[in-house]
């Protein structure tokens, strides 16, 4: 089921009578392809959960339209939209067993969709097998681990065969190892079912690892949409470049002058044909090559061993962060007490942004 968002906007009135309305979602336009997993990504307060609530029907848009396929669902109540919702806190009923929690949405079906107890049981078992909890059907939520509770919540959302599955920060309550395992399971389940899925998260690594497409938002505005690797490799602006990537991109005050990129008094890269201007220079951590004759000199701080790679931590007077992190192969050797480190730069890992607009140059 494709989902189309057309000029979708949501305003919340200011709590201060003299204040301006808060625009949580601002003129959102996008067609979510049928059967794909979309990562809705951005910092807290960017409007991603509000967008999910608008799609589900929990919020009413101030303006704009929402279509499921060719059907306008903008004014339909949540129960009539055919969506499955999974919340951050799972929202399981503590007094019900796993099976009873999964069956609960089926008990509310009416008319020709009404099911017998036997049919509901069979459907619950079928769905539980899909998320690999069919051996836990008689347990109560308090007897389950966090990952198992999350699977119950997913099963409950899937059991009525939703047209669209909506996941709001579903992994944020899990520890790091369990998050990794569960996100892989989410991807498997989505592929097995083929249901169009929208996954809200502030964790860029999480979104990039399982999404077919990511939508990067800030302050209610969509900044970039694309395949995860494409957005990482070709960020549209400084915000997107800084939001994606671990460690974060290194940003320097720089300028384009005479067809070269200058950081301080060093010409670090050739950019023929680029107009002279002040820029922000973004260099991905993996974009540095240790080179005794390299054009870019930084003050050495320390080297952190990471196994197959090492992180060279350094500083520069033109950097905007607290330090520079360069991820290089552990085969590179550095001298004890080394005061400076010189680098060549990989051109495709260097991004230039206008100093005023912060748009990609």
Image (cartoon, rainbow, N blue to C red):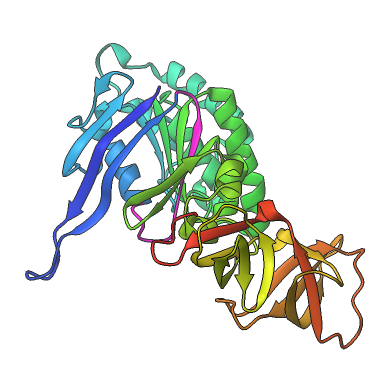
Q: Position of residue 313 (x, y in %)?
A: 73, 76
Q: Residue 346, position in %: x, y?
A: 73, 56
Which residue occupies 48% across, 50% down? 236
Would you identify the image quadrant in which residue 324 lies?
bottom right
> Residue 12's spot in the image, x, y percent?
18, 56
Q: Is residue 97 in view from this perspective?
A: no
For residue 264, above or below residue 63: below
Residue name at image x 67 percent, y 55 percent: 349
Image coordinates of residue 297 in percent, x first then y, are 74, 77
- Residue found 52% across the figure and 23% down from its top: 194
Q: Nearest the camera: 301 or 352?
A: 352
Q: How many marks?
A: 0
Q: Residue furthest top?
A: 112
Q: Nearer the viewer, residue 96 or 47?
A: 47
Q: Quadrant of the N terminus?
A: top left
Magenta stretch: includes residue 176: no
**Magenta stretch, residue numbers:** 34-47
């Amino acid at each position: 089921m494709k989902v189309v968002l057309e000029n979708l906007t949501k305003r919340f009135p200011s709590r201060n009578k003299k204040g301006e309305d808060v625009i949580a979602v601002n003129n959102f336009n996008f067609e979510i392809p049928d059967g794909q997993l979309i990562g809705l990504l951005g910092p807290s307060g960017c409007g991603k959960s509000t967008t999910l609530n608008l799609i589900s029907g929990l919020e009413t848009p101030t303006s704009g339209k929402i279509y499921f396929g060719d059907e306008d669902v903008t004014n339909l109540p949540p129960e009539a939209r055919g969506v499955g919702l999974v919340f951050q806190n799972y929202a399981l009923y503590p007094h019900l067993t796993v099976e009873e929690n999964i069956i609960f949405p089926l008990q509310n079906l009416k008319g020709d969709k009404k099911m017998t107890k036997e049919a509901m049981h069979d459907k619950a078992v079928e769905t539980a097998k899909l998320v690999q909890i069919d051996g836990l059907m008689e347990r109560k939520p308090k007897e389950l681990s966090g990952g198992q509770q999350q699977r119950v919540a997913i099963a409950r959302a899937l059991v009525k065969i939703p047209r669209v599955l909506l996941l709001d920060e579903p992994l944020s309550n899990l520890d790091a190892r369990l998050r990794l395992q569960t996100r892989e399971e989410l991807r498997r389940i989505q592929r097995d079912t083929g249901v169009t899925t929208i996954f809200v998260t502030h964790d860029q690594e999480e979104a990039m690892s399982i999404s077919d497409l990511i939508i990067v938002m800030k302050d209610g505005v969509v900044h970039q949409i694309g395949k995860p690797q494409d957005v990482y490799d070709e960020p549209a602006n400084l915000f997107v470049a800084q939001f994606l990537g671990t460690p974060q991109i290194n940003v320097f005050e720089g300028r384009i002058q005479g067809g070269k990129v200058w950081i301080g008094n060093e010409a670090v890269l050739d950019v023929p044909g680029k107009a002279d201007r002040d820029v922000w220079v973004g260099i991905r951590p993996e974009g540095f090559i240790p080179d005794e004759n390299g054009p870019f000199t930084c003050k050495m701080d320390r080297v952190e061993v990471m196994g197959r790679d090492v992180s060279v931590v350094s500083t520069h007077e033109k950097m905007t962060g607290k330090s520079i992190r360069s991820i290089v192969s552990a085969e590179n050797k550095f001298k004890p007490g080394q005061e400076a480190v010189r680098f060549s730069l990989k051109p495709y890992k260097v991004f230039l942004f206008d100093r005023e607009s912060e748009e990609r140059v």
